[in-house]
Image (spheres, rainbow, N blue to C red):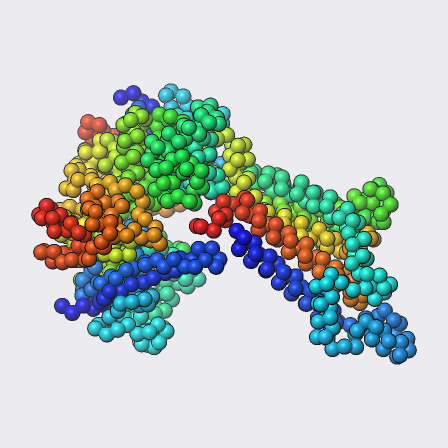
């Protein structure tokens, strides 16, 4: 078990390092921050001074070494735009993002799981077909389209809800629904196929054959088995709590991490972008780690390496 | 012997294809009766249909009476009481027939709670006793094991313990040893024989293996194409098979004793459900068929005392 | 008769890894096995799952390399895998196993699959191959019009016939059949068994027939080897071994076959499961389940010793058991 954990942790660290490295290289190759942050008409000396100040005049491998060394000391650099520490900039946006993504996650689970289970239990019924059609619509319609449609209907036409901003809890409703519906569709489809797979297993028939009432067969025998694959997808959703709202935050002008990312990328604010990516990679990897541990809890076959 | 289960004109249809075409079969209290036939003949479907264990898309008609009470169309609550409580069933592949995420002991105590109202320590003690009864060594510890931690033979013993938990009057064993090795098969058959003698429950043994049925049962039904085509006492069936299909099955089976002989294969294969002969289902493969065989389905009729066959030319 | 195939003291060791970095426990899947098959003869190998009978078959075919011991085909050592000589040998020996659907490519027609080995080994012109196809299909009893079908359009019995046609395409001298009829119904099984015996009679093919079904093995084999935990515990003429097995395991195995009517051997029900091959008991591996075990059996591993009737038995009490059986 210790060995298993150690190995998983090492792999998690490697994943984070790869993401950080990739982000670093791609960002440096895709444009010069000096040109974006300073105006292009700025004098050559000023641009050179800016480059020197931020170390952009050094060879890329040296920049990378400096950057990596700094990360190891917990130093994530300053925003090139306003000079504040990148980490502070990012962290102060997190609560706003979580305010959208956590309720959206609850919506995904609260809507997707029961819908998927219901559809599987009533396979090929009208309800099943409707749930599945809804699910497909939910995850094929891009979130900016869905977001704009919702804005059109509820904000512009009906005027019930605000179209953006962060004035009251009512501003949260549309972005949360936009975020939640797509995920709920994915989860419903996934849960349905996991349930169908399990319901076809011989042990389900065994449970019925020994007189377990159907409701208990579903609850006690089918769900614990169907939970095993479903946990993967929920883990992925938990992993995207921080960065899963980029598009929606932009559509609803919500001041969260996603919007910060869009702005920072546009401005070539390297330290901020890298800081966000590091954070995203870490949450994703941690969520995966938790999922792996959950497997062990849910599935006795994966416990204790003996067999 | 007093009747326990009586099946009449049982028909099952899946997506327009008939899997059972009118099965008539009786099981008396305490008897051991075998049901043989090749894959797709309907031997398992008969009992899954009787107990309401087929998927919802199956259309079932006919009658299955248990002690004078109709099971077909009975409300779920009544069926749940019958299943595991009066009629228990064990299956071919014990490893996949047990729930992988529950401990084996819990799967047995679940049946004890449902059918005998036992809980907690009493249920655990009874589960331990059942494990001992079915010959699982170190029962106290094995109760805590998961199915994947046990061998195929041990898992089938767990299935049997689970079946016994409800003190059933009838045990349906559907190919209980097909997935097991020869020496383990011998152990399980031995166990079933002993338990049947001790508890006095009736046993229906479903098998493709004529030898297994011959050893375990006093009466045998042979199925082909969704019907019982012959039914007799075990000794009669093997000594004087009446139906050409039964004769063919016996001749196609290699023996363990006597001179080695060339097997007599039955020509052709089982008819596809969508291409079913209008008369006797075996007619296209039969060496003694006549025009009458294609015209009408022969009914099961008595050809000797306690011996019935569904063939125009038998008896 | 000079053997076509001979295995001399062949062992194959697998490492059963425990955990991700666990050190492997050596598992002797096949342990010091010696076998011969003569042209036109059939050797049956019986035993329960995990006894090493399938591995023995793969070693005989040269699909696996022994860790020790030697396999000789036509009196010469097997060529090294991957070489041209090894590929040429492949045409001479073929494997047929239990699941014909798994053995076939679902996307190819029966004709394409049967002709494939001829194309691989560059045998014959296109016209000759078509002619060969017709002969092969007729030999295995498949209607010519089935040649253009795909595997899933055939029944289980027809598929096994198609697999056999493919195996026979290169005119092999040796056929290793691993549970070839186990997945088939009795009536179809008889068709395939008859066909195998007919083919052997017509072409003089040598066969190794691996099965857990003793009655089928008895019918088809001239000689038989009974395996337990990687070793041969009894070997001899098939009729003799099945009529009066000597080794206590062979007796239990033979007596476990369900029969109708009176049985010749008293039923011996063994206690317990076969042990894990990774934890082979010391002494005779069968002693924990043997009702006749002596103190000696717990410490001393019995050799395979030839008895007076030419049968070989690995049991300390073989002599007295043979006399009692006679």
Give the residue at x 80% y 57%: A88
Image quarter for residue B245?
Answer: top left
Residue A7 in picture, x, y percent from top left: 56, 58
Residue A31 in picture, x, y percent from top left: 78, 72
Q: Is residue C263 left or right of residue C231?
A: left
Q: How many marks?
A: 0
Q: Nearer the viewer, residue A61 or C132?
A: A61
Q: Is residue C239 left or right of residue B285?
A: left
Q: Quadrant of the C terminus of chain B?
A: top left
Give the residue at x 17% y 52%: C316
Residue B7 in picture, x, y percent from top left: 35, 28
Residue B240 in picture, x, y percent from top left: 17, 36
Give the residue at x 78% y 54%: A91
Q: Quadrant of the N terminus of chain B?
A: top left
Q: Nearer the viewer, residue A261 or A212?
A: A261
Q: Nearer the viewer, residue B256 or B108?
A: B108
For residue B285, above or below residue C62: above
Give the residue at x 28% y 52%: C282
């Amino acid at each position: 078990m210790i060995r298993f954990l150690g190995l998983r942790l090492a792999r998690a660290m490697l994943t984070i390092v790869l993401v950080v490295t990739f982000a670093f290289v791609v960002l440096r190759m895709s444009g010069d921050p000096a040109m974006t942050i300073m105006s292009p008409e700025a004098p050559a000396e000023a641009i050179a001074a800016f480059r020197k100040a931020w170390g952009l005049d050094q060879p890329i491998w040296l920049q990378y070494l400096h950057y990596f060394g700094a990360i190891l000391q917990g130093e994530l650099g300053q925003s090139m735009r306003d000079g504040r520490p990148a980490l502070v900039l990012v962290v102060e946006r997190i609560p706003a993002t979580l305010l959208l993504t956590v309720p959206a996650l609850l919506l995904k689970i609260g809507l997707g799981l029961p819908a998927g289970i219901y559809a599987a239990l009533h396979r090929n019924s009208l309800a099943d077909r409707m749930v599945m059609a809804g699910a497909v619509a939910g995850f094929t319609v891009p979130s900016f389209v869905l977001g704009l449609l919702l804005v059109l209907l509820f904000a512009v036409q009906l005027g019930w809800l605000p179209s953006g901003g962060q004035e009251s809890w009512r501003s949260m409703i549309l972005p949360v629904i936009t975020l939640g519906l797509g995920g709920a569709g994915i989860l419903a489809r996934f849960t349905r196929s996991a349930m169908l797979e399990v319901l076809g297993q011989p042990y389900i028939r065994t449970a019925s054959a020994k007189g377990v009432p159907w409701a208990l067969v579903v609850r006690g025998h089918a769900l614990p088995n169907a939970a095993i694959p479903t946990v993967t997808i929920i883990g992925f959703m938990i992993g995207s709590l921080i960065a899963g709202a980029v598009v929606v935050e932009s559509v609803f002008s919500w001041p969260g991490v996603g919007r910060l990312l869009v702005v920072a990328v546009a401005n070539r604010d390297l330290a901020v972008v890298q800081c966000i990516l590091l954070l995203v990679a870490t949450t994703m990897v941690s969520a995966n780690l938790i999922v792996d541990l959950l497997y062990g809890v849910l599935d006795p076959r994966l416990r204790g390496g003996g067999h | 012997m007093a009747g326990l289960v009586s099946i009449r004109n049982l028909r099952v249809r899946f997506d327009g294809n008939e899997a059972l075409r009118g099965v008539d079969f009786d099981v008396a209290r305490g008897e051991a009766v075998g049901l043989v036939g090749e894959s797709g003949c309907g031997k398992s479907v008969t009992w899954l249909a009787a107990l309401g264990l087929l998927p919802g898309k199956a259309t079932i008609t006919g009658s299955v009476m248990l002690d004078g009470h109709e099971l077909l169309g009975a409300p779920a609550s009544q069926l749940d009481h019958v299943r595991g409580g009066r009629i228990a069933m064990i299956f071919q592949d014990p490893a996949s027939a047990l729930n992988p995420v529950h401990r084996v002991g819990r799967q047995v105590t679940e049946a004890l709670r449902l059918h005998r109202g036992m809980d907690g320590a009493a249920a655990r003690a009874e589960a331990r006793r059942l494990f001992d009864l079915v010959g699982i060594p170190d029962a106290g510890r094995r109760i805590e094991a998961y199915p994947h931690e046990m061998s195929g033979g041990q898992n089938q013993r767990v299935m049997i313990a689970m079946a016994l938990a409800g003190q059933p009057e009838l045990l349906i064993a559907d190919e209980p040893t097909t997935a097991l090795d020869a020496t383990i098969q011998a152990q399980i058959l031995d166990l079933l024989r002993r338990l049947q003698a001790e508890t006095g429950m009736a046993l229906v043994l479903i098998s493709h293996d004529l030898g297994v049925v011959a050893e375990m049962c006093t009466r045998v039904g042979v199925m082909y194409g969704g019907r019982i085509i012959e039914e007799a006492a075990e000794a009669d069936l093997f000594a004087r098979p009446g139906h050409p299909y039964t004769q063919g099955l016996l001749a196609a089976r290699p023996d363990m004793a006597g001179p080695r002989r060339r097997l007599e294969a039955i020509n052709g294969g089982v008819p596809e459900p969508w291409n079913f002969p209008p008369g006797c289902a075996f007619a296209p493969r039969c060496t003694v068929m006549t025009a009458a065989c294609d015209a009408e389905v022969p009914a099961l009729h008595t050809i000797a005392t306690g011996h019935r066959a569904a063939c125009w030319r038998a008896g | 008769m000079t053997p076509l195939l001979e295995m001399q003291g062949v062992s194959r060791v697998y490492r059963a890894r425990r955990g991700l970095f666990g050190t492997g426990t050596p598992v002797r899947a096949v342990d010091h096995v010696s076998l011969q098959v003569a042209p036109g003869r059939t050797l049956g190998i019986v035993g329960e799952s995990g006894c090493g009978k399938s591995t023995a078959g793969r070693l005989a075919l040269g699909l696996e390399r022994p860790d020790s011991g030697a396999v000789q085909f036509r009196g010469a050592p097997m060529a090294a895998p991957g070489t041209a000589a090894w590929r040429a040998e492949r045409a001479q020996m073929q494997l047929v196993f239990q699941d014909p659907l798994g053995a076939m490519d679902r996307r190819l027609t029966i004709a394409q699959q049967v002709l494939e080995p001829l194309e691989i080994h560059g045998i014959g012109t296109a016209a000759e191959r078509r002619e060969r196809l017709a002969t092969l299909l007729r030999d295995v009893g498949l209607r010519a019009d089935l040649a253009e079908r795909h595997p899933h359009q055939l029944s289980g019995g027809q598929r096994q016939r198609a697999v056999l046609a493919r195996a026979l395409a290169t005119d092999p001298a040796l056929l290793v059949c691993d549970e070839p009829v186990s997945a088939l119904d009795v009536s179809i099984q008889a068709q395939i068994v008859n066909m195998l015996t007919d083919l052997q009679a017509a072409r003089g093919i040598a066969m190794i027939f691996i099965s857990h079904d003793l009655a089928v093995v008895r019918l088809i084999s001239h000689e038989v080897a009974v395996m337990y935990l990687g070793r041969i515990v009894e070997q001899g003429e098939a009729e003799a071994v099945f009529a009066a097995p000597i080794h206590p395991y062979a007796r239990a195995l033979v007596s476990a076959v369900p029969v109708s009517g009176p049985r010749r051997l008293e039923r011996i029900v063994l206690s317990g499961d076969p042990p894990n091959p990774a934890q082979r008991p010391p002494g005779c591996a069968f002693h924990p389940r043997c009702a006749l075990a002596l103190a000696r059996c717990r410490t001393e591993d019995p050799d395979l010793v030839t008895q007076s009737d030419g049968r070989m038995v690995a049991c300390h009490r073989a002599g007295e058991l043979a006399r009692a059986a006679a």
